């Protein structure tokens, strides 16, 4: 989608790499750093989209730095970097969700990175205050409504999901979902623990189905009218609408109305330079490239996510309209993850 004519990326991690000589500057759009010889960096990524690979190739083209990519599930990659310790071939660890970035950080897997480009391109609330990780894309957790079952106008805030008017009409994913955990952490930060506990109880009382295990089946259930309202990340609906999941899902998604609660809970995918990176300077360059408006655009659009600033050019997302972020910091959300999980369990969110 971005560059075309790309060959498959090496999916193996090489244990050997070039010497860590560093080139200066962040490779921004139209400002490619000089090719840096035989440098290599290792990237472990919880994201898994072909278009991400196109961006890594573009980075290599601009800088001469080869990217060795290993994709996997976030928690498995966190465990892997941890167990590899000083021997890890990962220079950059890319993870999905503020809570996972925070988890990796608490385990000491990241090191601080200083970069004017990153400070400029990543809003302060979407990065770690010590520079150990940086948001790269934004994802919004929204209400999807089947207008034949529930009135989209009845949902203006997340609090409305607990309204008795939705009794028997609400469908939720389970509390193991880190997305839901971060949503609850977000609400705890804004509304305090007692109000958030009441809210969770109210939503649980409104649910009509067993808790779902992922967002896409939940969106389908709403589209079919099995539920009136569900809570999902926008990109799942966008994937369905764009036809990525096939014609049936596309038709189903057309039945859904996406409602951004106001203000909206915004989560991120992001990355940081690993503590034991052998080539931290090159990792910082890749990080700055992915966070830059040109690099980040591709990273976000690939998965129907929002770029760090603005709305991007994804036609499906444009159809959803605009939203107002609640501004809660990703760092704070991560820090409240455990409290959120406890609160969900205490109030019946299975
Ligand atoms: Fe996801």
Image: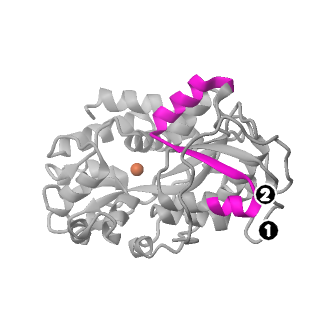
| Residue for badge 2 | 26
Question: Secondary structure under badge 1?
Answer: loop
Q: Can the viewer see residue 84?
A: yes
Is the residue 36 above or below the residue 182 in the image? below
Among the 4 quarters of the image, the one containing residue 264: bottom left
Among the 4 quarters of the image, the one containing residue 193: top left
Residue 271 spot, x, y in % from top left: 61, 45
| Residue for badge 1 | 31
Mark 1 touches mark 2? (CB < 8 Å): yes
How is the rendered protein coloured? one colour
Label 1 to label 2: alpha-carbon separation: 8 Å
221 is within the stretch colored magenta: no
Q: What residue span does the magenta drawing correspond to?
A: 57-86
Seen from the viewer's position, the closer of residues 35 and 115 is 35
Left or right, 241 with respect to 296, comes to left
Question: Secondary structure under badge 2?
Answer: loop
Residue 152 spot, x, y in % from top left: 26, 66
Residue 119 spot, x, y in % from top left: 74, 53
């Amino acid at each position: 989608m971005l560059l075309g004519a790309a060959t498959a990326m090496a999916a193996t991690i090489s244990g050997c790499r070039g010497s860590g000589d560093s080139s200066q500057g962040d490779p921004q759009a139209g400002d490619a750093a000089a090719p840096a010889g035989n440098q290599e960096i290792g990237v472990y990524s919880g994201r898994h989209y072909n278009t991400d690979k196109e961006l890594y190739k573009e980075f290599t083209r601009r800088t001469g730095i080869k990217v060795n990519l290993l994709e996997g599930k976030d928690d498995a990659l966190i465990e892997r970097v941890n167990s590899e310790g000083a021997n890890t071939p990962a220079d950059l660890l890319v993870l999905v969700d503020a809570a996972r970035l925070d988890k990796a950080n608490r385990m000491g897997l990241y090191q601080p990175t200083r970069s004017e480009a990153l400070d400029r391109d990543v809003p302060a609330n979407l990065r770690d205050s010590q520079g150990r990780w940086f948001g790269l894309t934004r994802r919004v957790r929204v209400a999807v409504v089947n207008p034949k079952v529930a009135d989209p106008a009845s949902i203006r805030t997340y609090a409305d999901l607990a309204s008795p008017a939705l009794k028997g009409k609400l469908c939720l994913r389970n509390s193991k979902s880190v997305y839901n955990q971060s949503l609850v952490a977000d609400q705890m930060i804004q509304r305090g623990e007692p109000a958030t506990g009441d809210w969770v109880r109210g939503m649980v009382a409104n649910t009509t189905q067993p808790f779902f295990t992922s967002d896409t089946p939940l969106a389908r259930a709403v589209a079919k009218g099995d539920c009136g309202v569900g809570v999902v990340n926008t990109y799942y609906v966008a994937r369905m609408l764009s036809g990525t999941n096939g014609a049936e899902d596309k038709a189903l998604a057309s039945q859904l109305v996406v409602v951004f609660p106001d203000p909206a809970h915004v989560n991120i995918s992001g990355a940081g330079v690993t503590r034991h990176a052998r080539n931290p300077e090159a990792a910082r360059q890749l990080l700055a490239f992915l966070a830059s408006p040109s690099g980040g655009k591709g990273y976000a659009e690939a998965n129907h996510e929002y770029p760090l600033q603005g709305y991007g050019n994804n036609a499906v997302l444009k159809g959803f309209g605009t939203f107002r972020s609640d501004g809660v910091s990703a760092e704070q959300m991560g820090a409240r993850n455990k409290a959120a999980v406890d609160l969900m369990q205490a109030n019946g969110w299975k």
